[in-house]
Amino acid sequence: MALPKGIQVFGPSKLSNAAYGEFMKVVARLITRGTCEKLGVDAAAFTGFQSHLARLVEITKELRQQKETLELNDLDRERDGLLVYLLWKIALEKSSPKQATREAAEALTLRRKQYLGIQDKPNREETFLIDGLIADAEKAEIKAALQALGLKETVDKLKTVNASYSEKMFARSEANLAQNPLPAKAVRKDIDAFYNEVVRKVDAMNVLTPSVETNAFVLSLNKLIKDTNDAWKLHKVQLGMWTEEGGREDEEEGTWTTGEKSDAEA
């Protein structure tokens, strides 16, 4: 007779505070669904876990409200507006009554299609794509077409704003490195201790005295772990942090966040 499937090994330390918090919030819901009694979880410890999790949410929120973040948001909105105007103007001028203007717009049509929707991309990806757009705009034939449509000033402004965004993003990352990470680390240490104990207990119960509740918890937690790992690896691929062989290049831990929701609770 095959033994029940155990809980997958998972190291949540690689996750950012936000992604880590999302993961542990789902764990809390899985415990609530299975009940502390049926899962062998100490009720008082679970209450403490929930308190630590609430504190981590507050810490994460405080970090997001930093002045640098607000400035980045303003710059992102500004460059989004410039992008939308630039691409809209090219499309509009294809219907211009002036032949020279129409021809200039037509000359930019293929390039325009390449950059449609980049304002909706993740911010770091958007920065990179705008850099590509700016590089294209420096080419003689494209530069002339942009000049004919009166868009040179818009492109110059976009270049300036995007450069400012990139510089401030770098400065914020450096500032975050310099901050004392102890508050979040201390809270996460307590949360980790509870999580590891829950995994140990439920894993053992699901082998020695399996129940519907322990089996459901194991299956759902494994699904959550898989979803989280898959999303994290995808994030690394997007940032070019994974090699073709599947290895991980060095990167400071704790920089990943995700808005994706796992379906492990379903």
Image (cartoon, helix red, strand yellow):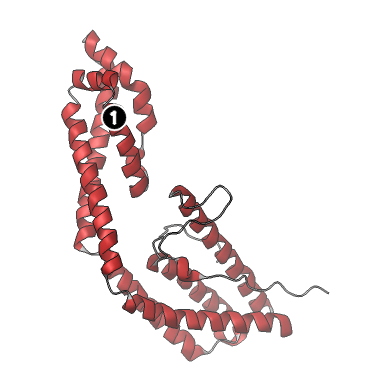
Q: SS at mark 1?
A: helix
Residue 105 in the image: state x and y as whole percent: 28, 18
Label 1, on which residue?
87
- Work out which quarter of the rendered image holds the N terminus and state it: bottom right
- Residue 98, compared with residue 137, is above or below; it is above
Residue at image location 29% in from the left, 60% down from the top: 173
Quadrant in which residue 221 is drawn: bottom right
The residue type indicated by label 1 comes to: Leu
Quadrant in which residue 59 is drawn: bottom left
Q: Is residue 209 visible?
A: no
Q: Looking at this rendering, what residue extends furthest in the right direction?
A: 1
Residue at image location 20% in from the left, 42% down from the top: 161
- Residue 26, compared with residue 206, is above or below; it is above
Residue 35 in the image: state x and y as whole percent: 56, 82
Residue 86 in the image: state x and y as whole percent: 25, 30
Q: Nearer the viewer, residue 97 or 111?
A: 111
Residue 98 in the image: state x and y as whole percent: 21, 10
Q: Looking at this rendering, what residue extends furthest in the front direction?
A: 250
Query: Within 10 Å of the Cα at label 1, are there few (<14), some (14-19), or many (20+) other Cα atoms?
Result: some
Residue at image location 23% in from the left, 39% down from the top: 81
Quadrant in which residue 183 is drawn: bottom left
Residue at image location 56% in from the left, 66% down from the top: 225
Left or right: 60, with 11 as reference point: left
